[in-house]
Image (cartoon, helix red, strand yellow):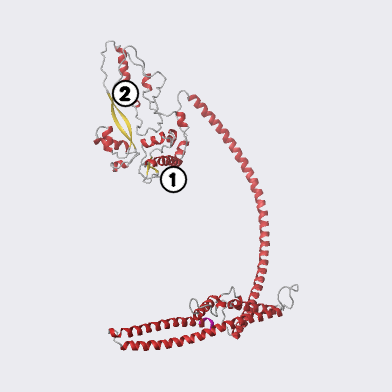
Amino acid sequence: MKRSGLFLSLLLALILSNPAAEPVMASTADPFSVQSGTNAAVNQNAAKEEVPEAPAEAPKEEAKPQTVKEIAKHTVQSGDSLWRIAQKLLGDGNRYREIIEANKAKYPSLEKNPDLIFAGWVLEVPVEKEVKPAEEKPKETKPAVEENKKPEPKVEKDTAVSADKVKNLPQWSTEEKIKKLQSALDSANRALLAQKKRIADLNEQTVRFLIDNKFMTEEEWMAMNPPEGYTYRLNRVGKIELVGNDNKPLTNADMAALDKKAKESAKAPETKPATDKNQSDADAKAKQEAHDKAIKEAKAKAEAEKAAKEKAEKDKNDKTAAEKIAAEKAAKEKADADKAAADKAAADKAAKEKADAEKAAAEAEKVAETRYQKMLGEIGIPDLADKRNDYYKGIKNGSDLLSKGFFGGTTPFYKFVNSMDYPEYDIPSLQRDLREAQKNYEKAIDKNKTNRILGIFGDTIESAGKKVEQSRARLEKAWGELGKALDESKAKAKELEGNVSGNKAKAAAAQKDLDKLDKYDSKNAGEVQRLSKEIKDINEKISDDEKKLNNYKELKSVFKI
């Protein structure tokens, strides 16, 4: 009994003195993070050592509790402070400096501003804990670790994920993780909309809510874990951001660079020292690899020499082909140059002929325009062919001048303003017809067109000349009708001028009589009333007549009368 108790005490002392035996507490703030490994709880070398026998008479010593340090992980929540975390985990808020020392490498800003921490940070807190040695058993003792066998790690129920499941997790990029987590969050917020609620923070409770309500699976959340040293947070508009130690959100380019760096690190080969057990296999493998490498290098050298020989032959053939191509190119360039010179000569000739034709046409058109203007002068009509707006303005002024009120009927200008119903009175169109007829007549003379095409198409000199006379006759007729309206307008204007002059005299006389009266003597009220009304009516007539006279001025300006 005494020997077995001493054996257990020595074994416990060896375990506690080994740093590898210190247990590591997994983070309790994030129940969905995946642990990458399990720390050994017993030093294997200690298990292999032989325990010396103790004297039978050695007294039994009472086991004293041992103090060990555990690293507790705390995920910062909204409302946390270093003092509160120290008070909760270390029993004294004034020990917050120990948390800063343990985490300043991961979060450098803690040293400069310990009051500023962010939700989502995972802080490591060194917690002291007393551990009592196991009591000795009265009858039998077993070694803590069997020889040449490592202790199996203990996994609590529902707190770990199988290696196969972790191995088969989707390998998403950081940007894809954020998109999928955002999609799950948006779906949850839509479901909570009916309750007028929304998720405003990413923490243990909200993530568990997303998983329990099937907005995402446990495996998807594992695959969405942010890169080491980074955390997720929600911004003011409910969008997920990935932030680092500086609390600044990463851009898509930053995340792509982060993924690229992670892939390169994953591709880097891991080197492990060979154990005594497989050293011979490693040596054999190294020799085989050296042999394969030598064969590969010899083969590569032979292929390089063959490629060099083929390249030399190809260069020789390429040189001959290049010389042939150069000769063909020179011949083609000469042919192209000769053709370009011929094309330029032909183009210059065509351009000259075109310029001569345009010049002749311009001179002919100038002559035709001169004759057209001469005919307008003979008729006594201004050129309104390209001034249709002025023409209609003049016709409207004439209509307003001769109008006898809203229901005063039509005026002599009616036919000239309704060109759709009376095309024979559309003076601008008639003038353009005359001008075009004169041009065609002169072209017929220049080309000596004495016959029609196929006997029925086109004009001869004689038929073109007849069209000029017909166009001129139509224009003279329309202008004659318009002249009657213009004469009537002229007479109306003369009448209005007389009315204005006479009414101004009447108004002056009435005003003179009114000025003689004492307007503020009630005995004169009747006469003051009569004279005032008379003056007002006369002035209104004068104003109406002067407006019509202004219409005549516009009409006179357009038609040069």
Please give the name of the residue rendered at 68% of the width and 54% of the height, measured from the top-left corner.
324
Please give the name of the residue rendered at 61% of the width and 38% of the height, measured from the top-left corner.
302
Q: Provide the secondary structure element on which disc 2 rests.
A: helix
Is residue 161 shown to the viewer in this render?
yes
Give the residues drawn in magenta, as a range.
Answer: 557-561
Residue 67 placed where, x, y %? 28, 26
Q: Which residue is mark 2?
A: 16
Residue 213: quadrant of the picture: top left
Tell which of 328 and 65 is nearer to you: 65
Query: What amino acid is at disc 2?
Result: Leu
Q: Provide the secondary structure element on which disc 1 rests.
A: helix
Residue 505: quadrant of the picture: bottom left
**Of the image marks 1 and 2, the number of the one nearer the N terminus:** 2
Please give the name of the residue rendered at 45% of the width and 25% of the height, measured from the top-left corner.
275
Tell which of 175 and 512 is nearer to you: 512
Residue 105 placed where, x, y %? 33, 38
Q: What is the crowding at mark 1: few (fewer than 14 residues within 10 Å), some, or many (at least 20)?
A: few
Residue 58 placed where, x, y %? 27, 12
Tell which of 205 and 97 is nearer to you: 205
Residue 41: quadrant of the picture: top left
Q: Main secondary structure of the magenta part?
A: helix
Please give the name of the residue rendered at 34% of the width and 83% of the height, measured from the top-left corner.
529
Residue 486 sits above or below residue 235 on the image: below
